[in-house]
Image: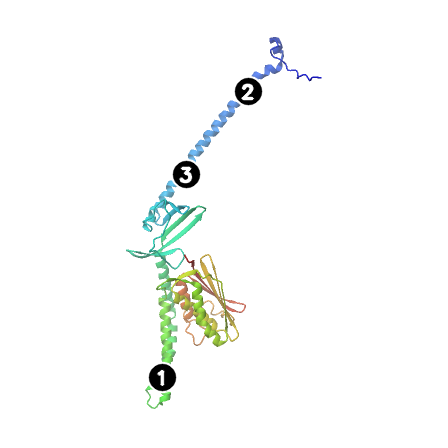
């Protein structure tokens, strides 16, 4: 059987009387009116919210403008140069940059002048100017494709650092004045005694020769002591150069190894430092500092014992550790170990470790001594950089 469509009421077939009797048709106009009223009310709320949102946007825009304006004033006022890079291309810089990089051009890559010489620490450069040599520091912060480069003149800070070191050395010299007199008195008295024997005509020729040799040794000792004192007072880098730190350690090892073999002490090397890792130093000063520590370790080592040199690098700092198997550092000396004339050896001047400390600190490095289970350990740090 064919399915009949559902019955739909036809408004055309209803009379006005039947429309009045239908409650659904009577409610539709009221519902439409309420819907329009609700729509109008919600529209007013949306308009109000939009107005508030626009006011907030305008306020934030003004605050952002004011903040950028203040930031611009601040960047223009600071003496340090600031450069904004986009994918290593200069997109913005403040006026102070022109004091360091007068040839900088927006839209081009940032390049450093060829006459900038690398200084001791990474990111530092020496610049020759009409007013004299300046030291500038370059710091770069990378954030994705953007980078911020800051360039500032740290010459005054370097001068204060050197002046502080000089004052500390002079203060140390004042404290050790009595020790200096003691250090010179004994060898001078001995030298005078030997010289008086040489003046005695009754002394045989072979005895005169022996006294002359003893006098010579005493005078050489006095000369070394005076040279060490001068090195302690004036110790600072005279001519720095970029050299591989591994080469410096190897040179120090070669200098001490024959003495170790002669005494029957084994010298072990565990230096894990890349050959292209460079330090900007006066090479001989750092070699002498390492030798002073190695000689100190050898002096307390007995035959059959070991001296170990190890080295690592991390975060632009290289660390060199020297360990011995001696009796360790006496607790009464550990706090004054690097002070002048602080020594536990009868034939030592006590200036070797003091000079080593000054040499390392003059190159922005450090040295630390401590006891460990088998002996004494010296830890040295220096700033370093990778070869270009």
In the rendered view of the protein, which quadrant contains the C terminus? bottom left
Mark 1 surroundings: few (<14), some (14-19) or many (≥20) residues within 10 A? some
Q: Is residue 192 above or below residue 367?
A: below
Colouring mode (rainbow / by chain / secondary structure / one colour)? rainbow
Q: Earlier in the sequence, mark 2 or mark 1?
A: 2
Instruction: Name the residue nearer the viewer: 74 or 204.
Output: 204
Instruction: Name the residue nearer the viewer: 140 or 56.
Output: 140
**Element type at mark 1:** helix
> Where is residue 253 shown, x and y percent of the image?
45, 69
Q: Which mark is residue 212?
A: 1
* Residue mark closest to the camera, 2 vs 1: 1
In the current view of this chain or complex, which residue is farthest to the front? 1
Mark 2 surroundings: few (<14), some (14-19) or many (≥20) residues within 10 A? few
Give the residue drawn at x 59%, y 16%.
27
Q: Which mark is residue 64?
A: 3
**Element type at mark 2:** helix
Per the image, the residue denoted by label 2 is 34
Q: Earlier in the sequence, mark 3 or mark 1?
A: 3
Residue 179 falls in which quadrant of the image? bottom left
* Disc 2 to disc 3, C-alpha distance: 44 Å
């Amino acid at each position: 059987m064919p399915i009949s469509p559902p019955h739909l009421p036809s408004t055309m077939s209803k009379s006005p009387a039947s429309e009045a009797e239908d409650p659904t048709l009577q409610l539709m106009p009221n519902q439409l009116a309420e819907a329009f009223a609700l729509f109008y009310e919600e529209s007013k709320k949306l308009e109000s919210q939009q107005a508030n949102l626009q006011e907030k946007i305008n306020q934030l825009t003004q605050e952002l403008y004011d903040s950028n304006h203040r930031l611009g004033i601040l960047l223009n006022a600071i003496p340090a140069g600031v450069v904004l890079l986009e994918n290593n291309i200069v997109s913005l810089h403040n006026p102070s940059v022109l004091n360091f990089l007068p040839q900088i051009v927006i839209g081009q890559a940032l390049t450093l002048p060829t006459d900038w010489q690398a200084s001791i620490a990474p990111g530092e450069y020496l610049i020759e100017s009409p007013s004299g040599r300046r030291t500038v520091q370059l710091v770069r912060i990378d954030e994705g494709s953007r980078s911020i480069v800051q360039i500032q003149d740290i010459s005054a800070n370097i001068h204060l650092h050197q002046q502080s070191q000089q004052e500390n050395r002079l203060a140390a010299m004042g404290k050790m004045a009595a020790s200096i007199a003691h250090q010179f008195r004994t060898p001078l008295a001995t030298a005078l005694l030997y010289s008086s024997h040489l003046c005695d005509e009754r002394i045989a020729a072979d005895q005169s020769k022996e006294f002359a040799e003893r006098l010579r040794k005493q005078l050489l000792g006095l000369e070394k002591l005076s040279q060490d004192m001068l090195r302690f007072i004036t110790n600072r880098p005279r001519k720095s150069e970029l050299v591989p730190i591994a080469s410096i350690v190897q040179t120090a090892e070669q200098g001490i190894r024959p003495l170790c073999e002669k005494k029957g002490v084994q010298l072990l090397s565990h230096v894990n430092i890349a050959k292209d890792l460079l330090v900007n130093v006066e090479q001989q000063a750092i070699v002498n500092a390492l030798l002073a520590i190695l000689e100190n370790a050898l002096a307390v080592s007995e035959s059959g014992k070991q001296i170990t040199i190890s080295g690592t690098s991390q975060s632009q700092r290289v660390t060199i550790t020297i360990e011995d198997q001696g009796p360790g550092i006496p607790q009464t000396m550990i706090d004054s170990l690097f002070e002048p004339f602080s020594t536990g050896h009868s034939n030592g001047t006590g200036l070797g470790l003091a000079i080593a400390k000054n040499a390392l600190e003059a190159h922005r490095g450090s040295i630390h001594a401590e006891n460990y289970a088998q002996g004494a350990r010296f830890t040295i740090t220096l700033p370093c950089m990778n070869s270009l």
